[in-house]
Image (cartoon, helix red, strand yellow):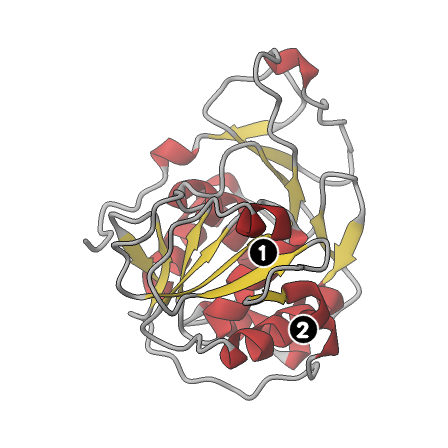
Amino acid sequence: MTAHVATVDELFTRERREDRTALVDTTRRDYDAHWLCTSAWKAGNFLRHAGVREGVTVGVTGNGPVALLACFGATLLGATTRPNPPADLTQETDLQAIVAPVDELESDRYELPRGTSMLGYGDKPETPGIKHFDAGLWSENPSFPPQSLPPETGLLTDGSRAVSHAQVLESARNLIDDYEIKAGDRVVVRGPLSAVEVAVAGVFAPLLAEAVTVLEREPATGDEDGTRERVEKDDNVTTYTISDATTSEPATRIDPTALALSDRTA
């Protein structure tokens, strides 16, 4: 049954800390809902130290579990996440922090507004001014005070348009109803999370339905579609792929470009 919530932070309550699988990464490692909730709380607590709060934006680079935790942590604080932002962010006046692999931050890939907090994950940073997201994450308090966010609070942005908690949840519910996504079903993400529609269909809809988000590597340049790992048929669950390309696999394809987000705010 789809949860009746007004904002996404309500999907990370203590009651939802269960041992069911909620996420599968590109190495096929499973993460349960208990880990996801507790780690999201830790991420929120750590991001709070970096000044993340309601009304600001957090850039998050990557499509793995750590990047998702950064997104969820920002969500708990009422901040808006910009997944996989461009290198030049100097004109982003509300950018409070960027979470990215340490090597990308140390290579000066990003041009940031003055005062932007840099939080790196992966190897321990050697550059002063870059805080280690991993170390901060795991040392944080595994609890989070209840929030009271307005449904119109911004949740995701692609830099030109943004969507609120209410808009994302409405679109997610429609998707769940249209495709009859149930708890335990698997949703394989085959598109960039920088696309708002992909994030809604591949991350937030499964989260709402208590389904499983399955992350997949981006194919290397020049690879053919056939090099992707094929989805295996499982008679016990329904599998969906989030992709704008057709497939002959035993899975139901969801085209994210068809997702109804026409009421996105400028």
Pick the residue in front: 20 or 89. Answer: 89
State which quarter of the image contains the N terminus.
Answer: bottom right
Name the residue type under label 1: Leu
Nearer the N terminus, badge 1 or badge 2?
A: 1
Q: Position of residue 247 (x, y in %)?
A: 58, 17
Q: Position of residue 138 (x, y in %)?
A: 74, 72
Element at label 2: helix
| Residue 153 falls left or right of residue 213 | left
Specify the quadrant of the image occupied by residue 20. bottom right
Element at label 1: helix
Name the residue type under label 2: Gly
Does the rendering let one see residue 266? Answer: yes
The residue that label 2 is drawn on is 136
| Residue 41 falls left or right of residue 55 | right
Badge number at residue 68: 1
Label 2: how many residues lie within 10 Å, few (<14), some (14-19) or many (20+)? some
- Residue contact at pointers 1 and 2, CB within 8 angstroms: no
Cα gap from disc 1 to disc 2, whole angstroms: 16 Å
Q: Position of residue 239 (x, y in %)?
A: 65, 35
Q: Position of residue 185 (x, y in %)?
A: 67, 45
